[in-house]
Amino acid sequence: MDKDYTCEDWGEQSEWTQIKVTVKLEQLDELVAVMNMISNYLQIEDYSDIDLKTCYGDLIDESILNADKTIASVSVYLPADSGVNDTLVFLRERCNTLSIDAKIDVSGVNEEDWANSWKAYYKPIRIGERIVIVPAWEKYDENPDDIIVRMDPGMAFGTGTHETTRLVIGLLEKYTKENMRVLDVGCGSGILAICAAKLGAKECKAYDIDPVAVKVARENIKDSGLSQKVTCDTSDLLKGVDKSGGTYDLICANIVADIIIRMTPDVAEYMNENSVILASGIIVERADDVINTFEANGFRIVEKAEENGWCALVVAKA
């Protein structure tokens, strides 16, 4: 069940099936790992850490503030004719094997409703010291030192609100230097490449296996006025990445543990002696597996950051 739906799948669909799985909060990370086997593009509902101090713009809807904070849900949206029954069988088997007490709901969703309903939950958010991620449709009164990144993630992963993305963006503030060449593998909405460019990188190349994500990222790059510094293309991890300009000074991989492990043996040829990798999307329970793989392939861990059960690593050549 590692199907990633491509542009052909998404393209002309008007009807979708939403599979929504609800679990106790403590089982959320395990559920996300299972749901990532179906698709990399998930909708996660976790209201346990809602804090008005981190929100900008409009107040959070009262229904969210009053939501049950002991449970969380993960949804995936599939084309209505894509073999939903097989997906449900897989989900139930994996949840039973892992002792995940899951409530699974299935419903039909119109494309327009899906594309717009989540916008109510996506508000400006400050990450690190200077970067503020602002939805393309929101107004925001910026401070003089703010670095504003306007995003419309569309159907691609990467709004800046999830821990995995926040961890990497915080590390980008620390490790991005002027005139760096940056590679983002599994770029989703393009948010990391855009942040790197705004932080001073001279050239950023972003890649994703999903043509829909590439399309969304290109639109965000264009809307950010960064087309001269940031490009986005399709690749299968490192296969297809442009090496004509030489090595990269900084490589971002905000994916999942298993995929990071798979790309580790090949990533050194894209690096120079001073390059660093920012690897994220790793649940804490899998961090040692990823670290051991890096170390076995001639790398060392420079820094480790954690947030709410997620881990990001800064990695360099040993």
Image: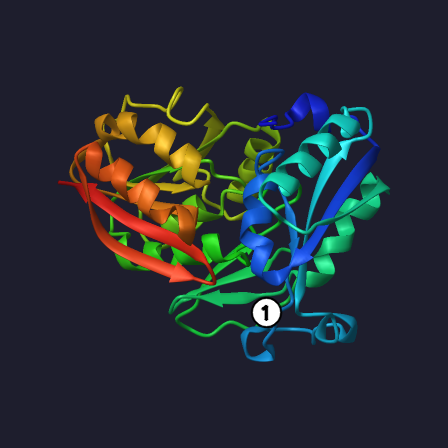
Colouring rule applied to residues: rainbow
Secondary structure of the residue carrying tag 1 is loop
Front one among 54 and 58: 54
- Image quadrant holding the N terminus, namely top right
From this view, report whether residue 71 is shown above or below residue 296.
below
Taking the image as shown, residue 109 lies to the left or right of residue 269, namely right
Q: Residue at x 46, y 40 (%)?
A: 256
Q: Amino acid at mark 1?
A: Tyr
Q: Residue at x 67, y 31 (%)?
A: 90
Taking the image as shown, residue 35 lies to the left or right of residue 224, namely right
Taking the image as shown, residue 6 lies to the left or right of residue 191, namely right
Q: Give percent across and percent down for residue 304.
A: 29, 56
Count the labels in the image.
Answer: 1
Using a 10 Å C-alpha cutoff, classify the residue at mark 1 as few (fewer than 14 neighbours), some (14 to 19) or many (20 or more). some
**Residue position marked by numbered label 1 in the rendering:** 140
**Residue 122: which quarter of the image?**
bottom right
Front one among 282 and 113: 282
Q: Residue at x 38, y 36 (%)?
A: 260
Q: Give percent across and percent down for residue 264.
A: 30, 31
Front one among 237 and 73: 73
Q: Residue at x 63, y 55 (%)?
A: 136
Check the image and name the residue furthest to the bottom. 53
Can the viewer see residue 11 in this picture? Answer: no
- Image quadrant holding the C terminus, namely top left
Can the viewer see residue 195 in this picture? Answer: yes
Q: Give percent across and percent down for residue 303.
A: 25, 55
From this view, report whether residue 173 is shown above or below residue 185.
below
Q: Give percent across and percent down for residue 111.
A: 81, 39
**Residue 88: which quarter of the image?**
top right
Front one among 259 and 185: 259
